[in-house]
Amino acid sequence: MFRCFVHADGKLVGVGRVLADGVDCAYICDVAVMPSHQGTGLGREIVSKLLDLCRGHRKIILYAVPGKEGFYRKLGFKRMTTAMAIFDDQARAMENGYVNET
């Protein structure tokens, strides 16, 4: 439903998107910033823009890379206790910290 693209000097340096139903659930995914632009506040700006676009949804869910939880906590996100997933390669998802046995 929503997307954000950031260009600098003619190159794509940051992206984010939201899958949403327009009422109940908005799902922020695929937020990425080129390493050359990380630490500049660009990721925060992208997520903030996406959050603004999601206003009115009853819940906003985020899928993030393991290890980035602190960044998203600063933006108001809390860890869910009920989120679950099935990956094509469950073993690799476990190795990379996306899922665990508990």
Image (cartoon, rainbow, N blue to C red):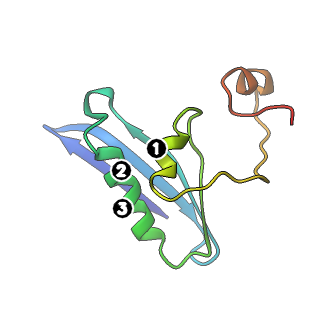
Dot 1 surroundings within 10 Å: few (below 14), some, or many (20 or more)? few
x 79%, y 21%: residue? 91
Left-right relation of 75 to 101: left
Residue that label 1 marks: 71
Label 2 SS? helix
Give the Cα separation between the discs numbered 1 and 3: 15 Å
Task: Identify the amino acid type marked 2.
Answer: Arg
In contact (CB < 8 Å): disc 2 and disc 1: yes
Q: Is residue 75 above or below residue 101?
A: below
Point out the residue furthest to the left here. 9
Left-right relation of 31 to 64: left
39 and 23: which is toward the camera: 39
Dot 3 surroundings within 10 Å: few (below 14), some, or many (20 or more)? some
Q: Is residue 57 above or below residue 80?
A: below
Q: Earlier in the sequence, mark 3 or mark 2?
A: 2
| Quadrant (top left/top right/bottom left/bottom right) for the C terminus | top right
Label 1 SS? helix
Task: Identify the amino acid type marked 3.
Answer: Lys
Q: Nearer the viewer, mark 2 or mark 1?
A: 1
Left-right relation of 57 to 11: right
- Numbered badge on residue 37: none
Q: Is residue 82 above or below residue 57?
A: above
- Numbered badge on residue 44: 2
Residue that label 3 marks: 49
